[in-house]
Image (cartoon, grey):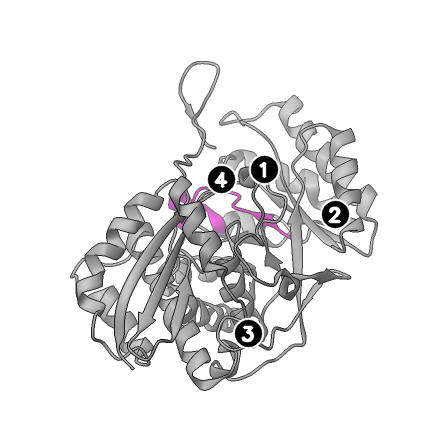
């Protein structure tokens, strides 16, 4: 079974899909996208395509090694995302060719359901209350919210108190039987995070995400982890097991590789195993589309240290689009009492509506992240 062709589709709201076709007619789908750099990743796919045509589609690991190592320059967000989508599609093909879900090829299921969480995004406390209740009504028992907007390098009382108030409102609305995670989004410097973590402990978040930007994590994560009882999470901007190792050694409690950035199913499975050695949990990052979510769930089902799965339903970035768009059957991702039932269909467990994808790709997108600046005009972390 040889790889015959690769085709990419730039589709709203900010996604890139990949279709790999084999000479036996089996098709695999992947989602090789980096938010705000979709066209760049698309070009990377085109550059890698000559290496792939004619290869045995079942040799997934050998292909992963070829793509990661043969170009001499390795790693990073662009290559990691391109390899991720190709890897997802090859696993999809493998599962379909054998008539089994991908997790069966990863050693089989270790759970029957996958816990998931939804985003709540209102800036004011009243809206936050409404958003949380709406998510509860939709069947979720866990949510995630951003901690703040722009933060000064050393945040003052007003900003600090605003973060605490949001966390307290989330805990009040969710009660003791549901969870919330708080995303610092790298907006907080290590000094401000150290202050905030101590102020937030009484709200008992499931975890705090990105308490510092990735380039400072190896220097400051250990001191932040030892300063608080709150579990610290990171990984959406980390792209390989080699990059994750120093973070895990520093006390990272929740590893958040993104299956569309960190080398796909193959590398994320290895990152999960590495995290297990350090007693850390797996919570894949996934503010993306249905293919990335499907790939994540396959890894979740097979990973003993899985914690919770992000999904992008209702995110503000999606606008009129939905995380379940482009699927023939959306019920595979139904959330009941906070969980998605283990999928049973072959491959990634989803069927892509190719006609809808092709039609949407005529529109495409040009999504870019916002640029924020402080009051003095200097660049602020978004």
The kind of secondary structure element at disc 2 is helix
Asked whether residue 252 appears in the rendered view, the answer is no
Quarter of the figure with residue 168: top right
Tag 3 or tag 1, which sits nearer the N-term? 3
Residue 35, x across and y down, in percent: 42, 44
* Residue underneath mark 4: 186
The kind of secondary structure element at disc 1 is helix
Q: Is residue 210 magenta?
A: yes
Quarter of the figure with residue 93: bottom left
The kind of secondary structure element at disc 4 is loop
The residue at the point 75 percent across, 31 percent down is 127
* Residue underneath mark 2: 135
Dot 1: within a 10 Å radius of its alpha carbon, few (fewer than 14), some, or many (20 or more) residues?
Answer: few
Residue sitting nearer the eye, 190 or 336: 336
* Residue underneath mark 1: 316
Measure the C-alpha gap from mark 4 to mark 1. Answer: 19 Å
Measure the C-alpha gap from mark 2 to mark 3. Answer: 26 Å
Residue 41, x across and y down, in percent: 30, 50
Measure the C-alpha gap from mark 1 to mark 3. Answer: 30 Å
The residue at the point 69 percent across, 38 percent down is 199
């Amino acid at each position: 079974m040889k790889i015959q062709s690769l085709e990419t589709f730039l589709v709203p709201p900010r996604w890139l899909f990949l279709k790999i076709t084999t000479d036996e007619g089996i098709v695999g789908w992947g989602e090789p996208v980096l938010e705000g750099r979709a066209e760049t990743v698309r070009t990377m796919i085109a550059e890698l395509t000559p290496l792939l045509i004619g290869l045995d589609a079942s040799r997934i690991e050998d292909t992963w090694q070829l793509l990661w190592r043969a170009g001499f320059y390795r790693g990073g967000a662009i290559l990691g995302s391109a390899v991720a989508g190709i890897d997802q599609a090859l696993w999809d093909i493998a599962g379909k060719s054998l008539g089994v879900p991908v997790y069966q090829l990863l050693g089989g299921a270790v759970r029957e359901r996958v816990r998931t969480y939804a985003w709540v995004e209102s800036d004011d406390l009243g809206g936050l209350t409404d958003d949380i209740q709406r998510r509860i009504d939709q069947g979720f028992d866990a949510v995630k919210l951003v901690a703040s907007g722009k933060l000064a390098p050393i945040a003052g009382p007003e900003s600090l108190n605003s973060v605490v108030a949001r966390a307290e409102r989330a805990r009040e609305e969710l009660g003791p039987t549901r969870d919330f995670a708080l995303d610092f989004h790298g907006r907080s410097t290590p000094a401000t995070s150290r202050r905030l973590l101590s102020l937030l402990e009484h709200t008992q978040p499931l975890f705090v995400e990105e308490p510092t930007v990735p380039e400072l994590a190896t220097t400051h994560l250990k001191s932040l982890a030892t300063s608080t009882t709150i579990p610290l999470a990171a990984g959406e901007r980390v792209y390989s097991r080699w990059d994750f190792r120093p973070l895990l050694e520093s006390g990272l409690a929740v590893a958040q590789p993104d299956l569309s950035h960190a080398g796909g199913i193959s590398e994320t499975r290895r990152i999960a195993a590495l995290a297990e050695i350090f007693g850390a949990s797996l919570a894949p990052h996934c503010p993306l589309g249905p293919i990335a979510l499907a790939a994540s769930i396959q890894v979740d089902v097979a990973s003993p240290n899985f914690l919770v799965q992000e999904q992008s339903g209702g995110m503000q970035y999606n606008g009129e689009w939905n995380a379940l768009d482009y699927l023939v059957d959306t019920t595979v991702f139904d959330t009941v009492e906070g969980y998605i039932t283990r999928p049973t269909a072959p491959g990634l467990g989803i069927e892509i509506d190719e006609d809808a994808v092709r039609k949407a790709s005529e529109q495409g997108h040009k999504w870019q992240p916002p640029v924020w600046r402080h009051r003095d005009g200097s660049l602020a972390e978004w």
